[in-house]
Image (cartoon, rainbow, N blue to C red):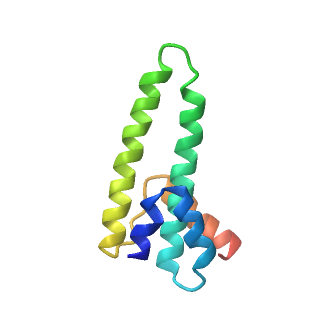
Amino acid sequence: IEGVLCYLLEEITGILFLVLERENDFIKFHAMQSIVTFLTLRIVKVVTVHIPFIGGPITLMITLIEIALWILGICKAYQGERYKFPIFGDIAEELLKKFNI
C-alpha cells in the first residue's frame, strides 16, 4: 500500500515517502521514481505551454502520458512489482544508488 501511496499525489507523496522510509528499498524506489517522473513532466509542461500554436497540444499529450504513468505506477506498486518506467525508472535507480538513500 505504501508503494501505491508514493504515486497518489505524484511528486509530493514521493518526497514524503522518500524522507520517511529508511529501510524498504521497494518503497524508496517507487518514491524516487514518482519524484523523477512527475517533477520532470511538470517542468516540461510549464515550458511547453508557452510555445505558440503547438504548446497546447504538446501539453495535452504530456498530461495524457502523465495520467497513464500515474495509473501504471499505482497498479504495478499494488501488485508488488518494481516496475521501471522507460527512462525515468533508470534515472530513479541511479539516484538511489548515488545518494545511498
Q: In which quarter of the image is the C terminus?
A: bottom right
Q: In which quarter of the image is the N terminus?
A: bottom left
Q: Is residue 63 above or below residue 51?
A: below
- Quadrant in which residue 78 is drawn: bottom left
Residue 54 position, x and y percent, is: 47, 18
- The residue at the point 54 percent across, 26 percent down is 49
Q: Nearer the viewer, residue 95 or 42?
A: 42
- The residue at the point 54 percent across, 74 percent down is 28
Residue 68 position, x and y percent, is: 34, 48
Residue 11 position, x and y percent, is: 54, 57
State the residue lying farthest toward the bottom: 23
- The residue at the point 52 percent across, 80 percent down is 25
State the residue lying farthest toward the right: 99
Q: How many labels does the image show?
A: 0
**Would residue 90 be seen by someone viewing this image from the given angle?**
no
**Would residue 53 be seen by someone viewing this image from the given angle?**
yes
Q: Is residue 100 above or below residue 57?
A: below
Q: Nearer the viewer, residue 26 or 9?
A: 9
Q: Nearer the viewer, residue 47 or 12?
A: 12
Residue 9 position, x and y percent, is: 47, 57
Side (left or right) of 99 relative to 7: right
Side (left or right) of 1 relative to 41: left
Q: Is residue 86 above or below residue 58?
A: below
- The residue at the point 41 percent across, 24 percent down is 57
Q: Is residue 60 above or below residue 79?
A: above
